[in-house]
Amino acid sequence: MRQWIGNDEEGQLGYFRKKAHDRVKRNKLTERLGLLSLATSVLIVFIFILFATSLSAEINTLLTVVMGSTLLLFAIRQGYAYATAEKELIKQYQYMLGIFNNADRRLIQATDESEKRQILLALGQLALNEHSDWMLMHRERSLDEGEIWRMGS
């Protein structure tokens, strides 16, 4: 039981805790990149509106390239996050973490071996059901090199 369920550092509890944390960090990076590209675009549009007649062609080109580049970087990161089902994986990791946390808590409170076996059986069935859902999701969103270039089209 301890090897399978584990604790904060190992076993399924450790695995799902680490994976959920990593995916949340990646998602926050995507969100920050989106805010940065939006803020950059708004700032550059205001610069164009306020100083359009006084800016040189080189400055106009540079600002346009900066705006386009930040939007492109965000679009690529967002497309990758979608293709790898980042938000769905966060939900699944957090769901599985909750299941294993509840099972761990219930196992600690269990009074006899029969009750522990029932908890482990229910946990195993839930884990298998969730794993099959996971497999279906990944099959629908498989990502290969050719797909990277077609994302968004």
Image: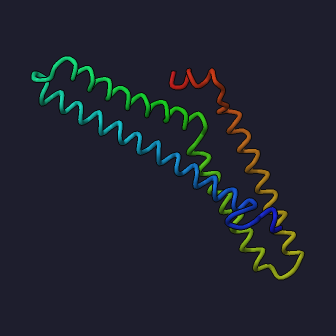
> Residue 20 at x, y = what percent?
60, 54
Seen from the viewer's position, the closer of residues 13 and 131 is 13
Q: Position of residue 151 (x, y in %)?
A: 54, 25
Quadrant of the image containing the N terminus: bottom right
Q: How was the colour assigned to the protein in this rendering? A: rainbow
Going by the image, does 50 lie left or right of 42?
left
Q: Residue at x 14, y 23 (%)?
A: 55
Q: Nearer the viewer, residue 20 or 122?
A: 20
**Residue positioned 84% across, 63% down in the render:** 121
Q: Residue at x 67, y 33 (%)?
A: 140
Q: Is residue 55 left or right of residue 100?
A: left
Vertical side of 86 occupied by 63: above or below: above
Expressed as whole percent of the image width and height from the top left, the position of residue 79 reads: 52, 32
Question: Where is 38 relative to 13, above or below?
Answer: above
Of residues 12 and 138, the one drawn nearer to the viewer in this rendering: 12
Q: Is residue 101 left or right of residue 34?
A: right
Image mark count: 0
Quadrant of the image occupied by residue 68: top left
Q: Is residue 69 left or right of residue 27?
A: left
| Residue closest to the far front | 58
The quarter of the displayed image where residue 31 is located:
top left
Q: Which residue is at a point 15% across and 28% down the rendered structure image?
A: 49
Compared to 1, does 89 lie above or below? above
Q: Residue furthest top?
A: 57
Residue 71 in the image: x percent, y percent? Answer: 38, 30
Q: Residue furthest right?
A: 114
